[in-house]
Image: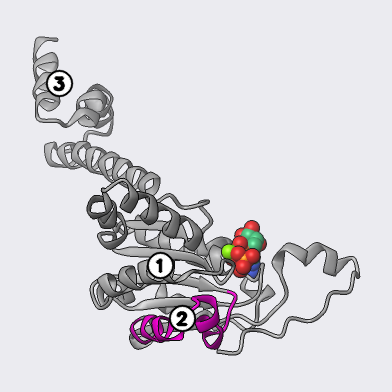
């Protein structure tokens, strides 16, 4: 079939590779269903656009460096009653990203801070947005290394460009002054320009000590909290769920005093 071959080649040349590959099957399917020309064309182009969207999401997912692919649907809200599900639902509309607002998850280990941050990120990736994930230790080490190798400007963009930057695990690592200054610069660059989702096991009052400098900590918090949704999770660690079930006693979580 010279005509079929010709059409396939044109589709390929136009970069419509999926349509080109599926042309044969779609033609047969349309003949079988006695579909109109327009329905056939729509269906063929639809497969192309779906494949394009899938590839784009996969690429953005890889570039995001998310630690896993857990979704909001997989989160058991009944295990963590201190979380306002309506607030999470509202955040999952991603209106906060358009307004360059921040989301801060506070709480002790294992209560789902990273899971919820990743869940929101997965939603954003599905909607065509870009995300970058780093825990604070990685962010600091990465930027310090880039500065030493004289390529800070280029590396900087990784943290300033994405629609959402996740800074995970603030509080597990004590920062020296130089590290706190780097974090301050990241927060400044994104302030009112792009959303940050941040997780911490420490109350804001403890950040001065954490950053070895109350002036920088105050300046960071001032910008971070200006337009922020704060979710303070008080509850038990999900990691210990099964142990709780089997009756092992664990000291009750006090939550994080904001
Ligand atoms: N309510 C939940 N429903 C389903 N899975 C949960 C829930 N809470 C936590 N998990 C799971 O438990 C594990 C620990 O959760 P997560 O990593 O989000 O905790 P975290 O608050 O970030 O803790 P840490 O401060 O130690 O980093 C993950 O595998 C996560 O998917
Ligand atoms: Mg975590």
Quarter of the image where the N terminus is located: top left
Q: Position of residue 100 (x, y in %)?
A: 28, 75
Q: Nearer the viewer, mark 3 or mark 2?
A: 2
For mark 3, what is the residue? 8
- How crowded pointer 1 is (Cα within 10 Å; few <14, some 14-19, many 20+) is rated as few
Question: 40 or 183: nearer the eye?
Answer: 183
**Element under label 3?**
helix
**Element under label 1?**
helix
For mark 1, what is the residue? 178
Q: Position of residue 146 (x, y in %)?
A: 33, 50
Which of the two discs, 3 and 2, labels the residue nearer the N terminus?
Answer: 3
Q: Nearer the viewer, mark 1 or mark 3?
A: 1
- Distance of label 1 from label 3 (alpha carbons): 58 Å
Find residue 15 and report its image quarter.
Answer: top left
Residue 89 appearing in the image: yes
Cβ atoms at labels 3 and 2 below 8 Å apart: no
Q: Classify residue 129 as left or right of residue 236.
A: left
Which of the two discs, 1 and 3, labels the residue nearer the N terminus?
Answer: 3
**Does residue 246 lie above or below 3 as drawn?**
below
**Does residue 1 lie above or below 147 as drawn?**
above
**Which range is magenta?**
201-223
Can residue 206 be found in the magenta stretch? Answer: yes
SS assignment for the magenta stretch, majority: helix
- Distance of label 3 from label 2 (alpha carbons): 64 Å
- Distance of label 1 from label 2 (alpha carbons): 10 Å
**What residue is rendered at 25% in x and 78% in y?**
192
**What residue is rendered at 90% in x and 65% in y?**
246
Q: Position of residue 20 (x, y in %)?
A: 20, 25
**Element under label 2?**
loop
């Amino acid at each position: 079939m010279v005509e079929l071959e010709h059409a396939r080649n044109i589709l390929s040349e136009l970069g419509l590779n999926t349509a080109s590959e599926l042309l044969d099957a779609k033609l047969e399917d349309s003949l079988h269903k006695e579909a109109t020309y327009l329905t056939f064309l729509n269906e063929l182009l639809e497969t192309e656009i779906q494949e394009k969207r899938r590839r784009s999401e996969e690429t953005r997912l890889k570039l995001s460096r998310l630690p896993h692919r857990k979704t909001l649907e997989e989160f058991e809200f009944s295990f963590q009653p201190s979380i306002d599900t309506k607030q999470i639902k509202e955040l999952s509309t991603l209106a906060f990203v358009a307004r360059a607002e921040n989301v801060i998850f506070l709480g002790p280990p294992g209560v789902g801070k990273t899971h919820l941050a990743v869940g929101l990120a997965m939603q954003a990736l599905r909607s065509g947005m870009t995300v970058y994930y780093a825990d604070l230790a990685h962010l600091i080490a990465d930027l310090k290394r880039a500065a030493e190798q004289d390529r800070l400007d280029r590396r900087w963009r990784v943290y300033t460009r994405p629609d959402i930057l996740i800074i995970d695990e603030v509080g597990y690592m004590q920062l020296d002054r130089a590290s706190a200054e780097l974090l301050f610069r990241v927060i400044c660059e994104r302030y009112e320009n792009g959303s940050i989702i941040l997780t911490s096991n420490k109350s804001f009052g403890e950040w001065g000590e954490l950053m070895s400098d109350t002036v920088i900590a105050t300046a960071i918090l001032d910008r971070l909290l200006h337009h922020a949704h704060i979710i303070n999770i008080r509850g038990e660690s999900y990691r210990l769920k099964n142990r709780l079930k089997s009756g092992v006693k664990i000291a009750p979580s006090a939550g994080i005093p904001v």
